[in-house]
Image (spheres, grey):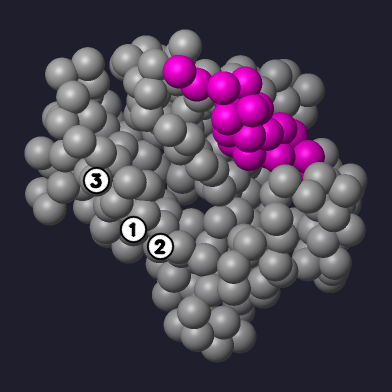
Amino acid sequence: MSGQNIFITGVSSGIGYGLAARYLQRGDTVFGVSRRTPDETLMANENFHFAALDLLAEEKIPETIATLLTGCQSIDTAILNAGVLGEIADMRQTSLKQLRWVMDTNVWSNKSLIDALYELSIPIKRVITISSGAAINGSRGWNGYSISKAALNMLTMLYARENEGTHFAAVAPGLVDTAMQDYLCDQPADNKYPSLEALKSKRGTDDMPGPIEAADRLIPVFDKIEALTESGGFIDIRNLDAS
């Protein structure tokens, strides 16, 4: 399925970087945004088009997206990947300022991005929002992250209802060894957060692949997402692996 136009947020590191690298290797054209400039592995590829963008700078999103996608006649897959974790703590210890920052990054920036993409009036085949099992697990300590990913799932569903020509899906990629795991694995042991200790035990195993390996699992799922869930649905890739 090479030769497609792929839009990805958060391409400088983590899952976004892995996806961009693998799509480029496949022969696709990648349009990427992130706060930081990716390394030369991506930047030197003639099929990679990049724009620096802070997703919290809402006023800059429409113009940046329009400029980046100048001349692009259609988007096969738009992957809204960029996000933040926030702090692992109980709800009563978490400030509204922290929660608003997580929500602004993980939810409202994606609304602005989707709106900017549709302002271009070009066909968009599918939109993938990167969700998490935290959206439904309700594990203690994951407060803002869990709330934001649950809201992202609903945001995805609502846009699906409004845009029948595009297939929308929220996809939980499973555990991936990224900078987020650096923070999580550095947290001191605490019996209040058993899910955190379970996560730490999986680092360095097949249950927590690196970004490139994760991309190898995710891209085939994205390619056939229409057959895996109705538009607006949520799937966890780990459940697909088990089935």
Mark 2 is surrounded, within 10 Å at the Cα level, by few (under 14), some (14 to 19) or many (20 or more) other residues, namely some
Given residues 67 and 216, the one toward you in this image is: 67
Q: Looking at the image, tell me whether mark 1 or mark 3 is earlier in sequence order.
A: 3
Q: Is the C-beta separation of discs 1 and 3 under 8 Å?
A: no
Closer to the eye: label 1 or 3: 3
- Give the amino acid at mark 1: Pro
Mark 1 residue element: helix
Q: Which residue is found at the position 80% from the left and 58% from the top?
A: 65
Q: Toward which corner of the image does residue 186 lie, by quadrant?
A: top left
Q: Is residue 110 located in the magenta-colored stretch of the structure?
A: yes
Q: Can residue 217 be seen?
A: no
Determine whether 129 is above or below 160 in the image.
Answer: below
Mark 3 residue element: loop
Q: Which residue is found at the position 48% from the left and 35% from the top?
A: 86
Given residues 68 and 203, the one toward you in this image is: 203
The image position of residue 118, as x and y in percent, is 83, 43
Q: Is the C-beta separation of discs 1 and 2 under 8 Å?
A: yes
Per the rendered image, the range of residues in magenta is: 93-113
**Which residue in the structure is indicated by mark 2?**
18
- Give the amino acid at mark 3: Asp
Q: Can residue 68 be seen?
A: yes
Q: Main secondary structure of the magenta part?
A: helix
Mark 2 residue element: helix
**Which residue in the structure is indicated by mark 3?**
186
Q: Toward which corner of the image does residue 108 lie, by quadrant?
A: top right
| Residue 129 as seen in the image, left or right of residue 145 | right
**Which residue in the structure is indicated by mark 1?**
211
Closer to the eye: label 2 or 3: 3
- Give the amino acid at mark 2: Gly
| Residue 51 as seen in the image, left or right of residue 137 | right
Q: Which residue is found at the position 64% from the left and 28% from the top?
A: 97
